[in-house]
Image (cartoon, rainbow, N blue to C red):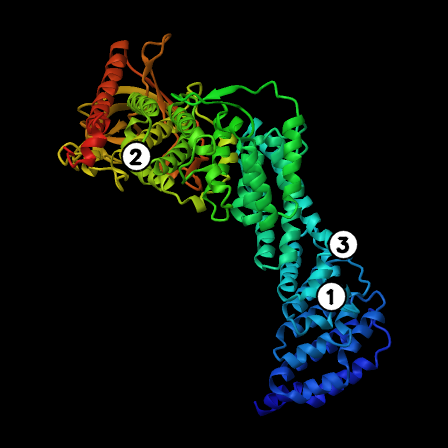
Amino acid sequence: MWFSLFRSIDRFSLQKFKYVVNILRGIKVVDQHNKELVVDLLQSIVEIVTYGDKQDPMIFECFMECQVLAEFVRVLKISRNSRIEIPLLQYLSIMIQNLDSEHAIYYCFSNEYINNIIEHEFEFDRGDLAQYYVSFLRAVSSKLNRDTLCLLVKVNGDAVVSFPLYSEALKFAGHEEKMIQTAIRSLALNIYNVCDDMAYEYITTPPVSKYFSDLVLSLREQCLHLDVLFHVSEDACTDQKRKQLFLHADKIVDDLYYLKDILNIGEHHLNRLVTENLLSSLVFPILYPLLQLRKNNVSKLSAVTSLYLVSRLLQVIGGKGMINSVAAVILYPYIKSSVQDAVKDSTAVNNFANSFPEHLNVLENTLHLAPKYEEEESISCPQKNIFVKRSGISAFLFSENQNLLLASLFLLLIVAESKDLDCLLVPLIGLNTTHGVDENFFSRFMDQILNALVKVLASQAPFSALRKWHAGWFLRKLLIVRGKKFGDHNLQHFNTSYELSHQLLEKELDGCWFDHILDTLRNEWTNCRTVLEESFQYKDPYFMLELAVSKETTDDDTTTYSAWQMMVNAVKVFILHLQLKSYMLKGNMPEHLVPNKMLTPASGSGQIHASDVSSASFGSEVSLASGVPCRIAFSNAGIRDIYVIPVATGISGRLLLTEKHPFRSQRGVVLAIAPLAGLSPKIDKVHPTWLHLRIREFDPKFATIKIKGAHANMSNHGTDGKWTLGFQNAQACETARFLILKETGKQRSNVESLLSPLLDSDWPENVLNGHDE
């Protein structure tokens, strides 16, 4: 034991360190024959130096006197196809990361040793060398501060002329490996956080500043690719394509957050450079053609993608320069000339976008010289004699395309709600202010916007419940501004929409999923309330793309899975109307579906006894008294003589297939169970003794649910099953069909009786006033 202890101490001694360094100095060439020896020597040096930095100052003194870092540089130069670069960079990274004393870090960065290693001509096409090299650069950047930065830059007079750590790192900015890209961005942020004025001047001056324009151009290419994926998903929507769309949108968001991190550093020149690149290369090329301010669509992006990208950019990056530039472009066609001049003067004074007055001049020339668009139409506010041209943002707000309506309105709200909005632009958009109709965008168009949103709520099949929920979110948001008040015209439309949702839910009582309506009501009530009350700051603009590529349910698809989706959508839409009506009446929405007891079966009607066939499970014994004898062919068991027993208890109903017990003549053993709802019994036209039953194979309890925000997307598309029962004669077949329909009717009546208070037209008023009988 004592021997091993002395060996451990000796391993990190000064004598051991000198011995290892002397061996390394004696090596003249590094090749395949001595590579392992050199690797062991480098490892020992790094371990002893790291130990000495914390425990023995004499070791690091020797490290400096012997100029060991110079030996690392020499090893790189004398290497002959030995591939010593990877272990050397790896051990150097470990050493730098573990050095704690400022004295040690200062020495390592001095004398150009680190710069010589950085500028060494590595052959990155071999193996994983690039990964280790970038890791080394990142380790160096993590130890930078204002005092050590000057050791890694080369200065001529008062200007930085070279910064190897930064310039060499940027060569890997577009590397195909995500891990390397992330490391380079982390390195860049480390550098930006410690730069002085001279270093910033170097970074923000061409050709080095090209990095920022390349970042934005790369982002622009990603936006174009996102639009391609969007069109592909729109034309042929599949789960895989939706996933690709989401992942690519997420990648764009990551890039935006990186730009946000750069802006958060707060350096004036850096912020100006990034903001101007974003505006000139991304934002304005998207907005000008989008708002018909240029005839040719230079960005080549669809309207939905463009609105999503600008909204997401404002939400992530924000800032006075970005918010006010976008706001002025959006509102420019609706601003009086006197206000336009004031906005231009304000932008020049506040410098929220240094080149923005120039952009406003371009807007003026474009608006005055561009030919009128043939598709422009006049629109008018209800009960107001105001007519404007459908151009700019209003062309989307009042588009027949509901996705464009919601997307453009979300962009407007982002601008209107921003704390960075310029004081001159606040009254122009007018969401939370009261100004003259001619000067206030929302005052001019509020009734029309509310009317368009109500039309979304009232839209008939095919429709998307998700779209209606988002429209409900916008309605509630605008009603808060309006003091929970609709105009008479819009209130009438909303009440009509409420009645339509009422009828849609009643229709589902005749559908094949009526037995799940009560559970769906309970489950979706909280979900809808969560969506409607979602904070504006946390609402994900991705809903714009999601709505455009989502499948809408239609009556053409007769599968029970499609019927399930239609039932859930009908319940969601009805709940939405109930909650909005509650909000308009009392200013709040019930936290729970009140009264909860009305959706729960009474104890007598829903009670299940052990002796009752309703409690039967697979393999249990039941009475055959109410059964009808028949035959069925199983794929694995051949033809079997069975009894069919339909039974409804409360709001539950099942069909039992039982086989006579071998020893008890009045008892049977359950072979199979199916839900009563959805059986749709039909007698075969050719063989009147055959009864066809449709079996719901899709089970909501075991469905795979993918949740995006408040949207659940079922991916378990089970095909419907089918049973064919053969009876002794046509009368027995008709009797079985009658019993199934009778029990199904009992089950439906029980569900309907529990729903009846909710379907009462006065339910919201009764509940909110406490009359919940």
Disc 3/disc 2 C-alpha distance (Å): 57 Å
Element marked by disc 2:
helix
At 69% from the left edge and 68% from the top edge, which residue is drawn? 90
Q: In this view of the protein, which residue sits in the foreground, 771 or 436?
A: 436
Disc 1/disc 3 C-alpha distance (Å): 33 Å
Q: In the displayed structure, would residue 702 be above or below residue 687?
A: below
Element marked by disc 3:
loop
Q: In the displayed structure, would residue 728 be above or below residue 100?
A: above
Name the side, left or right, on which 534 lies relative to 283: left
Quadrant of the snapshot with the N terminus: bottom right
Residue type, numbered disc 2: Gln
Residue at the limit of the structure toward the top, as seen here: 686
- Can residue 245 be seen in the rendering of this structure? no
Q: Nearer the viewer, mark 3 or mark 2?
A: 3
Location of residue 574 in the rendering, given as x and y in whole percent from the top left corner = 32, 29
Question: According to the image, label 1 marks what residue?
Answer: 86
At 64% from the left edge and 84% from the top edge, which residue is drawn? 52
- Image-quadrant location for residue 271: bottom right
Q: Nearer the viewer, mark 1 or mark 3?
A: 3
Name the side, left or right, on which 488 lies relative to 125: left
At 81% from the left edge and 70% from the top edge, which residue is drawn? 76
Q: Residues within 10 Å of mark 1 (few under 14, many from 20)?
A: some
- Can residue 237 be seen in the rendering of this structure? yes
- Image-quadrant location for residue 231: top right
Q: Which mark is residue 206?
A: 3
Q: Which mark is residue 579?
A: 2
Q: In this view of the protein, which residue sits in the foreground, 265 or 649?
A: 265
- Image-quadrant location for residue 169: bottom right
Location of residue 108 in the rendering, given as x and y in whole percent from the top left corner = 71, 76
First in sequence, mark 1 or 2: give its number.
Answer: 1
